[in-house]
Image: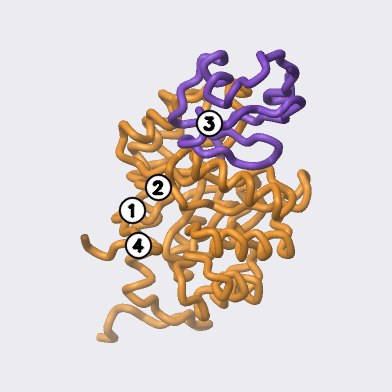
Chain colours: A purple, B orange
Amino acid sequence: MNVVVNGEERVLPAGATVADLLTELGLPSAGIAVAVNGEVVGRARHASTVLPDEALVEVLTAVQGG
Amino acid sequence: MDDPLVIADREYSSRLITGTGGASNLAVLERALVASGTELTTVSIRRVDVEGGTGVLDLLKRLGIDPLPNTAGCRTAAEAVLTARLAREALGTDWVKLEVVADDRTLLPDPVELLEAARTLVADGFTVLPYTNDDPVLALRLEEAGCAAVMPLGSPIGTGLGIRNPHNIELIVARAGVPVVLDAGIGTASDAALAMELGCAAVLLATSVTRAADPEKMAAAMRHAVAGGRLARAAGRVPQRFWAQASSPPR
């Protein structure tokens, strides 16, 4: 299936979860936040949340600013 | 703690809140943060890797400084609310510096969107510190909405124009039941001292330190200016007079 992660298209196996995506991206689950189709997916739900086809995923963290 | 800054359920001994934006690298930022004496520092929420990763959270943790996520870059209440929720998830804090700006040239707060976002976030359990215009009426509205502080600008973000309407800041201070934090526009130490003399509880600044020729030295200057201004406010200044008044006794 196809998803868009931070504006870039990616192909993932059907049934992939948020946790699977983070593993593939080489990201830790601490210090980041994930939104799928505009809704925050909390850390406790990363492993159980299956990404829908064509999902718009944002993976964010804190940077210098303000 | 002597004369602490109290916001919501937290106490800080420093009345200088800093930003992290604009520093050329983390080593420069670290020296400036240490010299400033700050205990609360803003960070922005962005896509991972967009700006080359982040060591800024690790740095703040090592220095014992609380991160204050902001919603910089948001134009609507909906964007700001989502960003605040993402920040809470990423950083594990329900404190947020709420910014909803109207356009890129002025970066002035959009009061309508700001107030709506503040109400939503307060209802969602956030401790909301809104960056607002120097508008005494809007400041009251934000306080009524449940904000833990109000943070009026001295002048637009990054301009270094200082406090353009000191009387409005005094009006905000005179009626506020929550801490007033002068946020944005500080150019140099005298601006920070003036903010405190006007009765602000704290000063939030970034550019004036991070883009100074010597950020570490300017951070120290700001630390002293905030402390000095606070003392002057408490001391009670002499009235201004039109004519001279001799300070030596007549013989």
Residue B88 left/right relative to B141: left
Q: Chain of mark 3?
A: A
Q: Are marks 1 and 4 on the same chain?
A: yes
The reply to whether discs 1 and 2 touch (Cβ–Cβ < 8 Å) is yes
* Residue under numbered circle 2: B40
Q: CA distance from mark 1 to mark 2?
A: 9 Å
* Residue under numbered circle 3: A48
Quadrant in which the C terminus of chain A appears: top right
- Residue B236 in percent (x, y) is at 36, 77
User: Residue drawn 59% across and 55% down?
Assistant: B162
Residue most extreme to the front: A15
User: Residue drawn 74% across and 25% down?
Assistant: A53
The reply to whether discs 3 and 4 touch (Cβ–Cβ < 8 Å) is no
Residue most extreme to the left: B1
Instruction: Kindly state the secondary structure of the residue where label 4 is placed.
Output: loop
Q: Chain of mark 1?
A: B
* Residue under numbered circle 1: B14
Quarter occupied by residue B22: top right
Instruction: Kindly state the secondary structure of the residue where label 2 is placed.
Output: strand
Q: Amino acid at mark 3?
A: Ser
Q: Could you tell which of marks 1 and 4 lies nearer the N-terminus?
A: 4
Quarter occupied by residue B72: top right
* Residue under numbered circle 4: B9
Instruction: Kindly state the secondary structure of the residue where label 1 is placed.
Output: loop
Q: CA distance from mark 4 to mark 2?
A: 14 Å
